[in-house]
Amino acid sequence: MRGEFYKELKKKEEDEFKEHTEKRVLNILENTVKFEAANFSAVNNTILDKALSALDTAVKGSNVQEESLQSSMAVLKNMGKGSKGGASDPLSTAVINALRDYSKELEGMSSADKDKMIALTQAQIDQIKTMDNTFQEN
């Protein structure tokens, strides 16, 4: 009887330990995914910043309004003729060129460097450790 009691107690402790460990691992993985998503979002923000910077530079150009108007008129004329082509808008061109330049920059990076762009920072790793220690104590 006593042996069976100890066996059940041991099984219960093992089950609780297993459950606790699984919860800790799941918590660590969830936090890692959140941080990587935030880092990926930061990369996307970099891309947007480059596009907005190019747009800002293009807008400051002296003839941008006139060029945009002429481009729009050319597109409308071509639409009336049934043509799908048209002159390119200088603002769109500036943004597209900035994005192409950044794309080339990314293409030139090694896979390891690309991975580093979304990899966890030391501060994020430390935060996960702190959260895990708190979780472990509970």
Image (cartoon, helix red, strand yellow):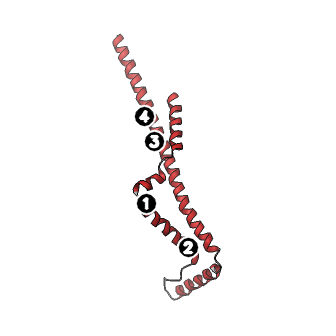
Three-letter amino acid code of the residue under disc 2: Ala
Three-letter amino acid code of the residue under disc 4: Glu
Disc 4 marks which residue? Answer: 22
Query: In the image, what residue occupies the spot 54% across and 55% down?
Result: 42
Q: x, y percentage for residue 79?
A: 53, 85
Tell me how far mark 1 sits from mark 4, CA to CA: 37 Å
Disc 1 marks which residue? Answer: 109
Q: Residues within 10 Å of mark 2 (few under 14, many from 20)?
A: many
Tell me how far mark 1 sits from mark 2, CA to CA: 23 Å
Q: Going from the N terminus, do you reach mark 2 or mark 4 first?
A: 4
Query: In the image, what residue occupies the spot 53% across and 62% down?
Result: 47
Query: In the image, what residue occupies the spot 53% across and 32% down?
Result: 134
Q: Closer to us: mark 3 or mark 4?
A: 3
Q: Going from the N terminus, do you reach mark 1 or mark 2 first?
A: 2
Q: Going from the N terminus, do you reach mark 3 or mark 4 first?
A: 4
Q: Quadrant of the N terminus?
A: top left
